[in-house]
Image: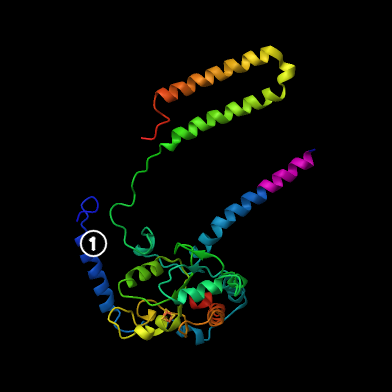
């Protein structure tokens, strides 16, 4: 029992060690002067097919998809609850049916609210 | 014409013209050969040799090419990188669209002065260490267009070229031979020489 878990712990250790060393090896090689490092202003500028960028590059980006992601998560949760209910449908009987409809009703109110608020429109 | 907040296309054109003129004036002759260190003998000890071997093995077996091709030699490169000539044998099948990932620039094609600042900028944005292969007559000397006022007479005017591959265009076998030469060159790098 315990040995199984120790294998998982070993696995986590190896993964962590591998991930950190992949990040740290290049940094260490550069700090030790083993690999060449020639930083320059052009090198750190944004890459745009070799052209100099015109206008500001650090623009703000609309994150409207965030609402859709939230709504999608609530849909996911609906599925998570509906699936076990559907599997056990016969043994749960009418009580289960009523409960799940209450649950769906609560969710539907949430969706109606989002709809009325205009969260589903791309503006 | 206004093409953005306070940016005028006339100003952009003027700016571009100045950049090209400056580059043209500063590139009157070829850059010095970057490979003089190849023949230098150096003190080697067991540590530097081992580290060198490891680093150079990693570098030469994963030469990633920057995709910045300007003219007809490109088709020979495309054929080299496809199944028949199979550049994947050398770990080179990864063609990078961003200079940040690339360490090899194959200059397949005629370069015009109008395009030169962009190619130079892409080269400058590549991570160290980086190499350049001048492919084809145009890459070496401007080829049949060498006399044109619009064509850069050889990439070595603006970039330090490591390997030259003659031909118009060079056959894929020639390109592979050039890559083999570059791999030999990479093997000679040493941390004792500072590269
Ligand atoms: S060397 Fe020949 S094939 Fe290659 S880019 Fe020049 S003209 Fe085209």
The image quadrant of residue A52 is: bottom left
Query: Which residues are drawn in magenta?
Result: A2-12
Is B11 a magenta residue? no
Q: Residue at x 20, y 66 (%)?
A: B14
In the picture, measured across the screen, residue B70 lies left or right of residue A3, that is left
User: Residue drawn at (51%, 65%), measured in percent from left and top?
Assistant: B95
- Near-viewer residue (B185 or A78): A78
Element carrying mark 1 = helix
Measured from the top left, where is residue B149 in percent x and y? 27, 81
Looking at the rendering, which quadrant does residue B143 occupy? bottom left
Is B81 on the left or on the right of B25, as rendered? right
Q: Say whether residue B195 is visible.
A: no
Of B128 and B19, nearer the camera is B19
**Residue marked by disc 1:** B12
Q: Position of residue B177 (x, y in %)?
A: 56, 82
The image shows residue B111 at horizontal and vertical percentages of 36, 76
Q: How many marks?
A: 1
Q: Position of residue B29 (x, y in %)?
A: 32, 84
Any part of residue A109 in sight: yes
CB at mark 1 closer than 8 A to ligand 1? no
Query: Is A14 placed left or right of B63 in the picture?
Result: right
């Amino acid at each position: 029992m315990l040995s199984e878990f120790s294998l998982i712990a070993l696995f986590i250790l190896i993964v962590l060690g591998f991930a950190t060393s992949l990040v740290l090896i290049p940094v260490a090689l550069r700090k030790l002067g083993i690999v060449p490092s020639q930083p320059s202003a052009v090198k750190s500028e944004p890459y745009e097919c070799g052209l100099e960028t015109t206008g500001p590059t650090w623009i703000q980006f609309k994150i409207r998809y965030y609402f859709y992601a939230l709504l999608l998560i609530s849909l996911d949760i609906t599925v998570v609850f509906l699936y076990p209910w559907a599997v056990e449908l016969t043994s749960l009987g009418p009580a289960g049916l009523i409960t799940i409809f209450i649950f769906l009703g609560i969710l539907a109110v949430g969706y109606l609210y989002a709809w009325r608020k205009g969260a589903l429109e791309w503006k | 014409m206004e093409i953005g907040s306070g940016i005028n296309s006339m100003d952009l054109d003027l700016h571009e013209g100045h950049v090209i003129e400056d580059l043209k004036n500063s590139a009157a002759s070829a850059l010095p050969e970057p490979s003089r260190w190849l023949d230098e003998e150096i003190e080697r000890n067991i540590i530097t040799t081992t580290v060198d071997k490891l680093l150079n093995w990693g570098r030469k077996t994963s030469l990633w090419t920057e995709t910045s091709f300007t003219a007809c030699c490109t088709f020979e490169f495309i054929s080299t990188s496809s199944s028949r000539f199979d550049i994947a044998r050398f770990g080179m099948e990864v063609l990078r669209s961003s200079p940040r990932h690339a360490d090899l620039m194959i200059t397949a094609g005629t370069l015009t002065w109008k395009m030169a600042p962009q190619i130079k900028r892409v080269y400058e944005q590549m991570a160290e260490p980086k190499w350049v292969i001048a492919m084809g007559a145009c890459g070496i000397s401007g080829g049949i267009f060498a006399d044109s006022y619009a064509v850069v007479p050889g990439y070595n005017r603006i970039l330090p070229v490591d390997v030259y591959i003659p031909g118009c265009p060079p056959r894929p076998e020639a390109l592979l031979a050039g890559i083999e030469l570059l791999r030999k060159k990479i093997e000679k790098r040493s941390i004792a020489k500072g590269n």
